[in-house]
Structures are given as C-alpha cells and as structure tokens.
Amino acid sequence: MQAISVNRILPLLMILIFSCKDQKKEVNIPFQDTKEEAYSYEIYSQLINGHKYLDYVGLLPPPPPKFTEEFTEEDFWKEHDSLKMIFKDSILKVAISPVLFNLGKEEVDQPIKKGVPKELYEKLGEINEVNLDLDKLSYDKNRIGLSLLDTIRNTEKWKNRFKASNVILSYSRVAFSRDYNEALVVEGVTSSKVDGFSTMIHLKRENGKWVSASPMNKGTKLMYKTLNLN
Amino acid sequence: MKKHSFLKFTLSFFILLMFFYSCEKEEATELEITQETEVVQPTEQEIISSKFSLDGFDGSSDIAKNSLKILWNEHKKVTLEEREWHEYKMEELVKIDLEEGEITDITYSLLATMIDDNPAYWLLRMDSRNGEAYSSYFDLEKGGFTGMTYLYNLKGEMSMARYYQKGNGFHGITKIGNPIALPAPSASRCDFKVTSSNCAGTSDCGLLQSTGGSGCGNGGGKGGYRRVRIPGDIIDRYNDHNNDGKGQPNEYSHTIFMPDRYKWVWVSNTSSGHIPQRGQQYQGIRSDGSIRNIPRPSAQPKRIIIDKSVKSNPCVKRVLDILTTSMSNHLLKQTIGKFKKDAEFKLTFSVGAMPKGNSGADAITLDRVTSNDEIRIIINKNNANNNPLELARLLIHEAIHAEIIRHVHKKSRNQVVEDRARLFQLFSYHIGLLSKQELDSPHLESHIRKKMSKAQHDYMSERFIKPIAQALHQFDGGKFTLKDYESLAWVGLEETYNYLGRMTEAERNRIEQKSAEILNKALNHASNICK
C-alpha cells in the first residue's frame, strides 16, 4: 500500500518542484533582452544629463525685492550672467541609488496620468528591481560626478550623504511598450533630507531619441502658468 | 356528434360576445356624454404652475436649483407696457454660505407671462450689495436696491443682467432672441445685445466702455459691465442614511468642487476689481441615493488629519501634540491654522516609508494635490522614534512647505489669497531661468518642480529663519540662546544663496557645530519626551 501511495504522490511532488523552480527563474531575470537593457540605460543617461550644478547649488543671488536707481534690473542680470560664467565648469555631485526600483502596487494604483497607456502603468508596478550598473551609464563627466549611494543607514556616510553629494537621484525600472517605442519611468530627486519629489516621465522614441510623449501633469501646468504670469 | 357540440359552443360564444360589447358601448356612450358636460378651463395661474419645471435647467449655472421652492400662493401681478407679468416668491430650502465680499444677500423670484396661451418663465436672481434682501423684482426701484439682477430662462441661460444703484437701474445686457422685451425699470436703458452670454472679452461681446457716452456705461462715466470668473462652489457631502436632513461629523463623505462660472458684474471705475465670491454648500446623500441640500453641519469636516500611523508612533505624536496644542502662537500652529479655515485643502501628517524615489529623505511633503485636495507630510518611519527636537524642526519645515503649496494652488484657481509678492517674484525668477532645452525636454515637469523648490527655499531663508528659531527655542525649553536655535532652522536650506553665497565658511561651520551640539543635548537630556 505504501508503494502505491508513493507512486501517486511522487508525480505530484515532481510537478510542484519544477513549477516552483520556473517561478524562481523568472524573478532573477534583470532585463528581458539586450534591447531593453540598452534602451533603459539610454533613458537613465539622458535624464541624468538633464541636471545642472546651479539647479542645486545656490551661488546665484535671486533678484532683490525692489530694484533701485543704484541697482537696476539690468545691473542684476549683468551680475547674474557673469556669475553664471564663473560656475559654468563646476561639477554637480550626484549620488545615485544603486537599485532600479519597482514602483509597487500602492504607488501604481494612484490615478493614471493623462496620456499614459494603462498597460505601461501596470507594467511599472510589476517589473522586478535590479541593481544599477554605473558603467553602463553615459553622461557628461565634465559636468557631473556620479557615485553610487551607500544606503546603509545610521553610518557617518549616510549622515553626511548631502555633504558628499548635491543631489540624490533614484530611478525605477523602465516599462517599455512591446515595440519599444514608448517608455514609462519614475525619477526621484532628493536634494536634502527634507526636500525631494518624484516625477513620472512618459517617453516615446523619435528618430532614435527619447522625447516627451505626454502633456505635463495638469496640476503642474496650472501652477507653471500661474507662477510664470506673476 | 362532436361537430354538433362545437357549433353549439361557437354560437353561444358569439352571442355572449355581442352581449358584452353592446353593454360596453352603452357605458362608453354614457361616459362621453358625461365628459362633454364637465369641461373646466384652468386659470392662468394654474397653467403657469402646472407647466413649470426646472428639470431642464443647466446644473452648471450659478443657481442651486434643487434647493429652490416656488411659493405659488405668494403671487403678484403687474402690468408693464400692456403686458401682464406674474411674479412668484421663491425660497431657498437651504441657503448657500457665501465667502465674504460685495454681495450680502441672494434672493430669487419667478417671473412668468403668457405668450400665445403658453407661459414663458424667467428665474430672477437678485444679488444685493446693500445688506438687504429683496423678494420682488418690482420692489427694486422703490426699495432703493443696490446690486446685480440676472434673469435666466428655464434652460439656465442668462437672458438679462442689470445693475442697480439705490434703485436706479443702469443700462443692462440683454441676450438677443428673447421672444419679448423683458421687464425693465422705467429709467432709460441701453439694452446692449450680446450674441452669447458666454463671451469672454470685449471683442466678441461688442461691449462696454467704461467712460460715459456710447456703450453700456451708466452715462456718467463711472463704470461698466465686466465678465468675471467666479470660483465654483464647494460642496461638502454627508451620508445622511437616516434621512434626518442633518450632517454629523462621522457622516462626512467627501468634498466636490464645482467648475468655475462666468458672470456679468458691474465694476465702478473707482473699484480695483471685482472680488469673486464662491459659495459653500452642504448636501446629504439619502438612503435612496438622492441628494438634498442640508444646513451647515455643527461640526466641519476635519481639515487637519493626524493619520493613524502617527498615533502608533508615540514620539511623533507627542512632538506634534506639543507643537500644535500646548504652545501658543506657535509657528506650526499658525501655519497649519490656515488649513483649518480652508474648506478646500486638507493637510495630513503621517509616518511611513518615503516614496520609492526619495528614500534618501527624512521627511517629505507630497505636493501632488490630489482629486480630494490633500497635501501630505510624511515623516520617514526610520526617524520616527528618535530625537524630538529633530522631529520638531522637520515638522515645522515641512508644514511651511505645505502651506506655501496650498497658497500657490489657491492662487492658480484664481481665489482670493493674501498677497505674497516676494514669494511669487522668486517663483517667476526661478521658473524664468528654464532654458529652451529644458522647456523642450521630456522631463520638463521635473525641471519646474526643481525651480519651485528652489524658490520656496529662498523664500524660507529670507523670512523664516527667526520664526523657526523662536519655535524651536520654545519647544526645547530655551536651553540655548535664540541665536543658537537659528542654526537648526537652516536644515534643508543649505543650498540657498543666503547660506552658500552670503555666509562665510566660518559662519557655516559654526552653524553645523551648534546644530550638532543642540541636537545631541536634546537627544540625551533627561527631558527627552521620546525616551
């Protein structure tokens, strides 16, 4: 009787074991293919290159509340432009998170940004995390100094993370459409321990370059219009 | 034999059928005769009341039609230029609260007149500016009414607008295509025809000169009609499942924001501009799903929310309690106090994980104003049970950001907000620095947000160092001098020009050292409320 039981159970066990193995394999795959990897790093590089030293380092004075005869608006812009020249070769110190994160279901469940295909949005929440390979990034080394962020908390390095870098950048995995013509990625920008934001960026491929695929978020557009008008 | 039976049956059936038919016909004949003798003609009043309906009234107009009731028994008849006008009083079942402004009272009445045996209706709205409510169109002149009147047809389209000053009706704006001339005051009028009540400017309205002479001014060169945007009403909805017509605090459901409307208003030359006034409504959702206006509930929905994640972090909770309740005139209390008075935005404090893209932060303000207009401050749970003074300065810093975000959003919605010229000058300056490349780039949104962040930090470095220092000095029991606490206030502002550009390296080093000293003492002190 025992023999009969084993003969029945064993095939079942074999099926279970092999199916579990298959699942494990799926989790460990970083990129589906070389195209996904290449395009991902293209996008990350482009986004990193978009950051500038003077965006984060306040060495240009803002205008005074009121201009006077002694210091006119013209004087202000002359001073501004000459200071800008002084810092044009300064290097922005960027620490980048070593993990390309998975957005997670909670953040993905937020209202979908207008113009973003739903399947891309869902994919962003599903694709697994993977470690970033700094060597695969191509960025302007004359302007940007890139290093991996040490994420172990409560160390001296962690406490001084904003002394060592002007800004910390983090990126999600890139969700691509099947034909690789559209992409969705999240960029996190943290400039101090009390200041940061994340933006979802929808891109399309045009003539070999990644360009914006969706209009600006409605709230940001309204704020931009309001602030620009004043 | 079967055939015989069938025939018998059929014959009987037909006989019976004929019998019943003849009986019915006789009855019908009797009835017809009866109807002919009892025909009654309805009165004009009955026709007017029976044919009236607001079902087709456009809900997006500025009339809360579901709260209006016609008092058919309170009726007035007036003859003007050989035409009879009926006017019926209207009451609002629940009055809408109005923001403070020029309009003091809003009342309604229904005007009707017969055209070819059919009633034509206009709903009249009277926006009084002289502190008195008026109930009849025909009392405006003799009653010395000051304010605006609007006549709407039953589709909710505005047919006429006219301004009165102490009973003197000014030139009005009338929509062409009205079947009859609408009732007007006896003073000479200029009914300037507009092609659409939705025109946005003088070019498509052919409208108004603000000086006297031609156009729809008042002839004395003292103003004209302007088309202004009125922010949409805010409606707080409550689940009124017991149908008692009241909103309890635990019944609050959500808040909706009606779209902005456009109205004609009179703007005098001496006025700096019309102050738009939005309405605040309260509605109960009954058990059958129907919605009715309800009076203002005794307790308003919470605008400052302490998330349960804070309650389960005793250190954060204690610090927040002290900052918001025990300390009088505290900066945090003043800052978040603006949310308490704001029906539109709510502020949530929470403890949790940072957004995935900002795991390097200790605290963050989510400035994505969501569909229910919530601004959220998150303290990193890894910092939640640490140093109370550190927590205090994080909370104060973030609360200042949250309030600035609220202010900017309100301004972007054209609401009346206090002037912060310097803040907006800084915003304009930083955003104006966006290069063409950045404007064309796929992460323009990220660039804009960076600029907005810089502007806010510049503003805080100019205006908030001393107030933050005072707040922390008070919170910490004044163990150091006020000047020393200024060191702590610079957290998050170390990249501003006031810190990097104006201070010497020695001054910055001193700030760093003093901050570390004060925080260390707070952490190790016996009075540490987080121990």
Image (cartoon, rainbow, N blue to C red):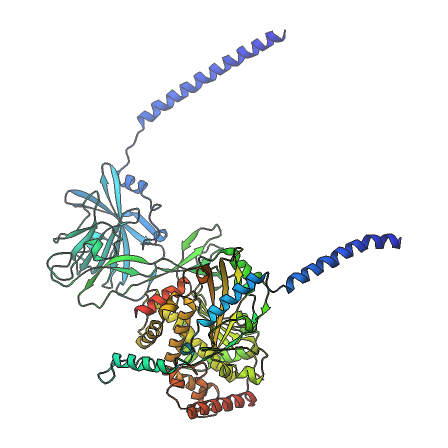
Q: Position of residue B219 (x, y in %)?
A: 11, 59
Q: Position of residue B159 (x, y in %)?
A: 24, 49
Residue at the spot 59% in from the left edge and 60% down from the top edge: A32
Q: Is residue B91 left or right of residue B505?
A: left
Q: Position of residue A152 (x, y in %)?
A: 59, 79
Q: Which residue is at the far right?
A: A1
Q: Position of residue B438 (x, y in %)?
A: 39, 69
Depth check: give the residue in front, B144 or B495.
Answer: B495
Depth check: give the residue in front, B288 or B148.
Answer: B148
Q: Quadrant of residue A28?
A: bottom right
Depth check: give the residue in front, B389 or A183.
Answer: A183
**With respect to residue B295, does B66 lie above or below?**
above
Look at the image and tell me whether residue B93 can be seen: yes
**With respect to residue B355, does B500 lie above or below?**
below
Q: Quadrant of residue B433?
A: bottom left
Look at the image and tell me whether residue B248 can be seen: no
Q: Is residue B391 left or right of residue B455?
A: right
**With respect to residue B385, does B103 lie above or below?**
above
Q: Quadrant of residue A215?
A: bottom left
Residue at the spot 41% in from the left edge and 62% down from the top edge: A216
Q: Which quadrant would the C terminus of chain A be assigned to in this image?
A: bottom left
Circle count: 0
Q: Is residue B225 left or right of residue A85?
A: left
Depth check: give the residue in front, B113 or A86.
Answer: A86
